[in-house]
Image (cartoon, rainbow, N blue to C red):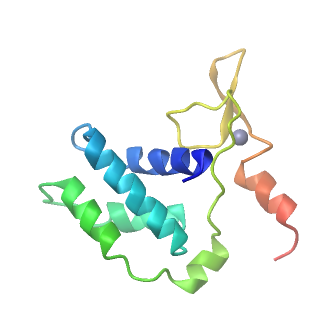
Amino acid sequence: MLEGRRAAAVELVMSLPWQHQPSTVQRKRLIDLVDTAWTAGWTSEALRAELVAELNGVRSLYAVWASRLRDLPPPRVGETRSAPALPPRCDDPRHDPYAHHRLLIDPDTDRPGRKCPNCHPDFISAKGGPR
Ligand SMILES: [Zn+2]
């Protein structure tokens, strides 16, 4: 798996509402499954929506997520067209490694500030031309 793609998979997995910190093995397993889902055409947004849906009363989130990822239906075509998967976040060191957005840390305030010109969706879709 490419480095940037792995980082994006880690980000997605760690953005899930874990009850406890996942073990290394659990994390790695879900990251691999996320990567497989991306290859199948799932977008991060659709995948996350699928994973966080209906978790009330779930005892082991990890078990639920692993089985949902293993048994994913084919992605809905309309969805993949209207929301193309974002490429992995770029490796600009001003990104907050623990945040999910594509903003760069403003050195003056130490807070996320402007949109990253390399990987923020606004800039990516602008580059992509007419749909
Ligand atoms: Zn970036």
Residue 124 occupies quadrant: bottom right
Expressed as whole percent of the image width and height from the top left, the position of residue 78 reads: 59, 84
* Image quarter of residue 22: top left
109 sits to left or right of 122: left
Q: Residue at x 71, y 17 (%)?
A: 107
Can you say whether 92 is above or below 61 in the image? above
Q: Quarter holding the C terminus?
A: bottom right
In the image as oriented, which residue stretches furthest toward the top?
Answer: 108
**Image spot of residue 57 (x, y percent):** 13, 59
Query: Which residue is painted at 57% across and 78% down in the image?
Result: 79
Q: Which residue is rendered at x = 40% and y = 50% of the image?
A: 13
Q: For the image shown, how many numbered marks are present on the structure? A: 0
Instruction: Say whether residue 83 is left or right of residue 1.
Output: right
Spot occupied by residue 103 in the image (x, y as percentages of width and height):
67, 37
Residue 72 against residue 26 in the figure, above or below? below
Quadrant observed for ligand 1 in the rendered image:
top right
Residue 129 appears in the picture as rendered? yes
Residue 59 drawn above or below residue 24: below
Q: Is residue 42 above or below residue 17?
A: below
- Whether residue 42 is visible to the viewer of this picture, yes or no, is no
Identify the residue at image location x=51%, y=63%. Answer: 45
Towards the viewer: 91 or 77: 91
